[in-house]
Image (cartoon, rainbow, N blue to C red):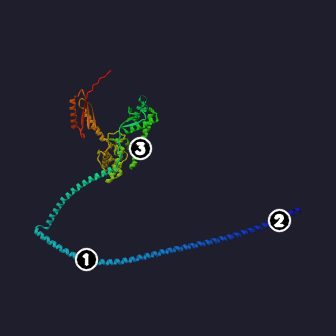
Amino acid sequence: MDILIYVIIAIISGLAGFLFSKAGLKAKSEAIIREAELKGESIKEKKISQAKQKFFELRDKQKSERKDLDSNLRSREDKIRNTEKNLNKQIERNKEIESEIDKGKDKIKQRLNAIEKKTVDIENDRLKAIELLEKISGMSAEDAKKNMVEQTVQDAKVTAASLVQDIIDEAKQKANTEAKKIVIQTIQRVATEHSVENSVSVFQIKSDDVKGRIIGREGRNIRALEAATGVEFIVDDTPEAIILSCFDPVRREIARLSLHQLVTDGRIHPARIEEVVAKVIKKIEEEIMELGKRTCIDLGIHNLKSELVRMVGRMKYRSSYGQNLLQHSREVANLCATMAAEVGVDPKAAKRAGLLHDIGKVSDEESELPHALLGMKIAERNGEKPEILNAIGAHHDEMEMTTLISPIVQVCDAISGARPGARREMVDAYIQRLRNLEDLALEYPGVTKSYAIQAGRELRVLVESEKVSDSDADQLSLDISTKIMNEMTYPGQVRVTVIREKRAVSIAR
């Protein structure tokens, strides 16, 4: 019974708690709803105020734009009114001009009528004058006209022939003057240094002890050097120097660099020599290509094939009559560009032809062709244009010139080679003249030696005292001087001195 009572009481208390909690939740929910409604009202009022403000801003902006539009329309209306006024004035002015033109037409018609009357009168007078002249001269007008025309034609021919000859003479004179002017200006505007190449190079060493190491045991090192480089190594009594002799400058440079590397390294034996020479040859080839590329860049010459670039680089190690071939080719290229610009020819093509005109001199091919034709063949193989090929092949007149670039290259080649000091040709001629002078004296019997001294102005002749007497020496001097006058060309005078010396030699033993 008690348990039942407790159960009932618990149920009643649970129901009461449930009812109380439900009432609390309802109150809370009502409070939340009221708060949400208040917030919604505030947000609504805020949005309405913002919309009103935006509306007022848009209205003010529209008013401003409308005001600007109205002002633009007014200004355009004013311009249109002014234009209409100007057009009306122009129309009135045109009407006035038309009226004046009509008045002028009437005056012109009157003048034309008067001129026609005068023309008729003049024609009548002319016919009367012709009839009178025909009566006086006894010739008709047609005959007189023919005679006059023939005389006029004859006089015109004589005058024209004289004028033509004068024009031709003046044109030739002017052409020669202009050509000289262009050549002189070109020479003055282009100048390069001139270097004379020799057939020997001197390698300096610190002490003469190095010479023995270079020669090696029984000369094996120097033989290996000469075999690997193709250069003759001259080791003599010259202090602290070794002479490298070879006509090929590339080989001479390879030998010089190889010897420098060997002496610096200190290891000198045949195997090492072959290794160093091979490395130096590879380095020289790379330098040749680099030099060719740099030369083309300096001159502004593009799209040159690698074979031609290599040949341009090889020109540095080649000389012609003592003139460095690369310096000569660069100078010819610059001269060609300058002269081509003066005469209205493409300067880039002329410069290209000037640089390549002597590539036949540095070719590795064994050919009997002249260097100009060989160079043209090489350039043709490398895709050069026909005008470039003709300029290369014709610069020594070994083929016909077909473009204006060809004579330009020929002239510039001659200018570069004719500069004072550019070539060794004059020196070679001078040395040959001295040799001829000495050989002339050696042809006489009793002459042992002869020396041309003082730049060829004196010839000293040594004779054997047993074969030539004092009186014979006088006669020999006269004979040699006479032969020089008859057979040789020389500046100034040549003094012939015959030296006869008597030596008495005995030996004490």
The label on residue 250 is: none
Position of 101 with respect to 314 (left or right) is left
Instruction: Classify residue 316 by image quadrant.
Output: top left
Three-letter residue code for mark 2: Ser
Q: Nearer the viewer, mark 3 or mark 1?
A: 3
Closest to the observer, 449 or 22: 449
Instruction: Classify residue 53 by image quadrant.
Output: bottom right
Q: Nearer the viewer, mark 2 or mark 1?
A: 1
Specify which label sits upstream in the sequence, 2 or 1: 2
- Measured as percent of width and height from the top left, residue 40 is found at 67, 70
- Measured as percent of width and height from the top left, residue 18 is found at 79, 66
Q: CA distance from mark 3 to mark 1?
A: 89 Å
Quadrant of the drawing holding the C terminus: top left
Secondary structure under badge 3?
helix
Specify which label sits upstream in the sequence, 3 or 1: 1
Classed neighbour count for the residue bearing mark 3: other residues with Cα under 10 Å, few (<14), some (14–19), many (≥20): many
Secondary structure under badge 2?
helix
- Kindly identify which residue carries mark 3: 289
> In this rendering, is residue 313 above or below 48?
above
Specify which label sits upstream in the sequence, 2 or 3: 2
Three-letter residue code for mark 1: Lys
Secondary structure under badge 1?
helix
Q: Nearer the viewer, mark 2 or mark 3?
A: 3
